[in-house]
Structure formats: C-alpha cells, structure tokens
Amino acid sequence: MNSLWPIVIGGVLPALFWGITAIFQKQSATSATGSAVYLIAFGAACALAGLIAALIWRPAPWTAEGLGFAATSGACFAVGTGLISFALFTYGVPVSKLAPIWSCNVLVTLAIGAVSLGEASELDVMRLVAGTLLIISGALLVSSLTGTGAPPHAPAVAAPFALLICCVQAPLRAVPEFDMNPRQLKTFLAVIRHENLTRAAAEVNLAQSSLSDQIQALEEELGADLFLRSRQGVVPTPAAAVLKAYAEEILALNDEAKAAVSAAAGNAAQSITLGTLETIAAERLAPWLSLFRKKNPDVGLKLKVGGSGELLAQLQQGSIDVAFIFDRGQQDERFLTRRIGSEPLVLIAGRDSQARPPASLAALSTAPFVATETGCVYRHLFDTAFAEARIAAPSIVTEADSIATIVRLVASGTGYGLVPRLAVGPGAARGNVVELPWPGKPPAASLIMMWRRRRVQPPALTLLLQSASEELSPLRPGDARLRHAG
C-alpha cells in the first residue's frame, strides 16, 4: 500500500470509534442495561447506519453470498459484544481491565487471514513475530496492572515478557491496590441515600462511570458485594448496611480530627451548626443563643430549621452539630442526649362541631381525626395511645405536615386533632377550637438536645453544652404555635 489514506480510513479511524464504543458500552452497563437490550439498541443503530449509507452510496450492490458473510460477521460481532456487555453489567468490571485483552483479536484476524484468505504471502514473518510479542506482552502488562491478570493459556512465546512484567509489578503489589478513603465512603453513602447511581453521582460531582469504579474498588477491597444492581436502581446488601454505620463514624471522626487540629493550631474559626424545630427556635432558643453569642463572640452560629426526623438525619450525616428534637425513644450509642422539657398534647375539636368530652378512648375510636403523617412523633404518640389500650386507632381523614394546618382544619370541622398545647392558644382565644379532656393520661412529647459522642469534643461545642446546662431552662408551654410537625 503506497497511500496512507487506506490505513487512516480502514485502521486508525475504526480503532478510534471502537475505543469510544467501549466507553459507551460501559456507560450502558452502569445504567443497568442488560446484554439483550444492549444488543437490540446496538443492532438498531447499526441498521440505521446501513440505511443512511445506502442512501449516500447509490446504487448499493449486493449478492446472496455477500449477505451471508455479512450476517455471519454481524453474528460473531454480536456474540462478542454481548459477552462484553454481560461481563460489564453482571460483574461491574471496569472497561479498562477488558480492553487490553481485546487487542489479541488482531492475532485471530491475522491467523484466519493467512490461512483462509491466502494472505500469508503478504506477511513479513519477522514483523509478525515481533508484533505478536508486543500485542501479547502489552495485554499482559496492562490487564495485569489493572487487576485482571494474564489471559489463561497465554502463548509460551510471551514468557520472557511475562517474567519482565512480574519483576516490574512485584514492588507495586507490596502496597494494597485499593485503600478505603473518605472520598470512597462519601460516594458509598450517597449511593445508600439515593439508591440510584445517576443521582448519587450528581451529589458527589462524579461521572457515573467514575462512581461505579469507586464502588467496585470498595467492593473488591472489602471482598463483598455492597449493592444489588437492577433496572430500577441499586439496593444495599446486608454488608452495605453494616458498612454504613462505620462509614458515618469514620467520616465524622475524620472531620472531628481536622477541626480539633485546626482549633489547636489557632488557624480556624470556631463555629457550630444547630438544627431545631421552628417554634422552638423562635420561642425558646432565640433568647438563649443571643446570650451565648454575647458571652462567646468568637464562636459562629448557624441555625437550620426542620422536622424532628429531618434533623435526626442531618445529625447522622454530620450536617449539624446539635439537634433540638422530640424524643422518639430510639437508642443510638453514637449520640448523647439531654432532656430540655416536656410538651403536652391536647385533644381539640371545632367549636361549631358541638363535640362533647369523650367518655373513653373507645368512644374516640370511631371519631374522624386530622393528624400528622406516619413517622412524626405526634402521630407516633397518637397511635401508641390506642395501641397500648388495645383499641383500634380512629380513622385519619386528613394528613398534614403542619400543626398550624391541622388546627385550621379542626376549626373548620374536618375532625378532631391531637396537637401540642402550644398550638391551641391563639385558636382558642379566637373561639375557633375548643380543648377537650383526654380520657386517661394525656400524651406528652419530650424535647431533647442531641449531639454526636466524640472522644474529644470541639471547644465551641463544649462551650455550647455548658451554656445549655446553665442557661437553657426546661421548656414551658406558652402562647406560641408550632408551624412544622416534629
């Protein structure tokens, strides 16, 4: 061949496009596309490309024999690419581990071309031997360094090169190939939270393929599958559930060590992030935090508002340092708690409904109720009161995540409500609702402050806890409304 164009068109460009093809094949596998669907989509794209080519190069000559060879070529290619897709999807192996071995297809092509197509006379034997050695040794080197190892039954001609590879790789294997690090653990926890690789990758600012490689590296190091992959997403395995608690603790300890060292070195500003219910922040914490700030002007404060469940999740994730929430009765050795006060709940009804005080819980079991959603501490207390009395809970006609909304719905006659006493002051004064006696001991929710147990507490948090112990008196009901459910 005297022209360079055939080499570029028939060799360089196909290599480029086939390399890109492998990347998209990996992306397809990490997006939970199985081999069968992949081949269908792949075949449809090939068919479309053929139609476009037929429109460009008219007329498109063909023979029955040529079609047969083309179909056989397509079938062989489909088997090969289907097996690759299966390996990528089922085992999650990085494409970089398989690609070096694919280069051996050149040897298969050369052998068949020389024997079956009569091209042996065009081959330079010395160059063929040298190229063969380079191809095999290259595949051995790259795939071995990425963890795949040498292909089984490698030709003996590559033995000297394999020996050289082992000598080069020996010192590399003295250090673990993967080492669990905070970034991997953050990626792992993001996948746990979302149970979806695409959304998790967006949270940690990684390409989906990079995220998949991190998870696979973690699985290889731990020797256990952490997720079950499907078209709907990923599901954590029991091993992942165990790792989750350790990952959160490791990351918290990592942040704690950084903060402690920075504080000791005097090169970092001290700050605390608090999470609280909205009314508690306005009615109870505001005066105390103002006093704390005056006594500790060098400590920065940040306040986040949410429901009890949301705040607990943020505390577990390390987004906040202290949470002021309602006690759900759940024990977690990772955290310490301190009781601030008790919040009684009261039974209310619309004044226009002419509701009478219930004689017993059984009398309430047939009444319609407006309540918070399942998972809220108020709903938990509501359900528990009837469950402990072995009485069927009343029908919930409307659910709402706002206590103020529940009060307004009750005032309009939608049904009864069980709400904090703090919520009924303004409504009762306006004559919209009436407080009824609860049959038996009224339910009450305990307000607590919760923070992470640490070997060494940050200085700013120590100051805050000491101030809370001295200045934050138990909460007393007052003329205020809870705007968000706990």
Image: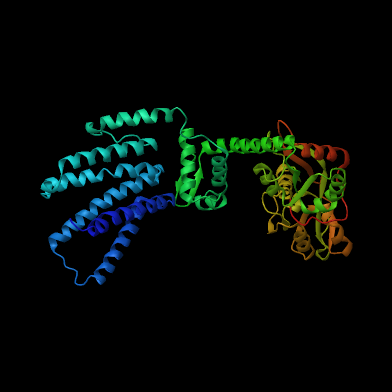
**Pick the front one: 97 or 190:** 97
Examine the rendering and report whether any part of residue 358 can be seen. no
Tell whether 96 sits left or right of 464: left
For image coordinates 32% across by 61% down, the residue present is 45
Residue sitting at 18 percent across and 57 percent down?
2
364 on left or right of 141? right
Q: Quadrant of residue 244?
A: top right
Front in this rendered view, residue 168 or 88: 168
Q: Position of residue 387 (x, y in %)?
A: 70, 44
Q: Position of residue 265 (x, y in %)?
A: 73, 35
Residue 317 occupies quadrant: top right
Q: Is residue 12 visible?
A: yes
Q: In the picture, which quadrant includes the N terminus?
A: bottom left
Taking the image as shown, residue 21 lies to the left or right of residue 74, namely right
Horizontal and vertical percent for residue 69?
Answer: 17, 56
Looking at the image, the residue that sits furthest to the front is: 2
Give the camera-side residue of 151 and 124. 124
Q: Residue at x 16, y 68 (%)?
A: 61
18 is higher (above) or lower (below) than 219: below
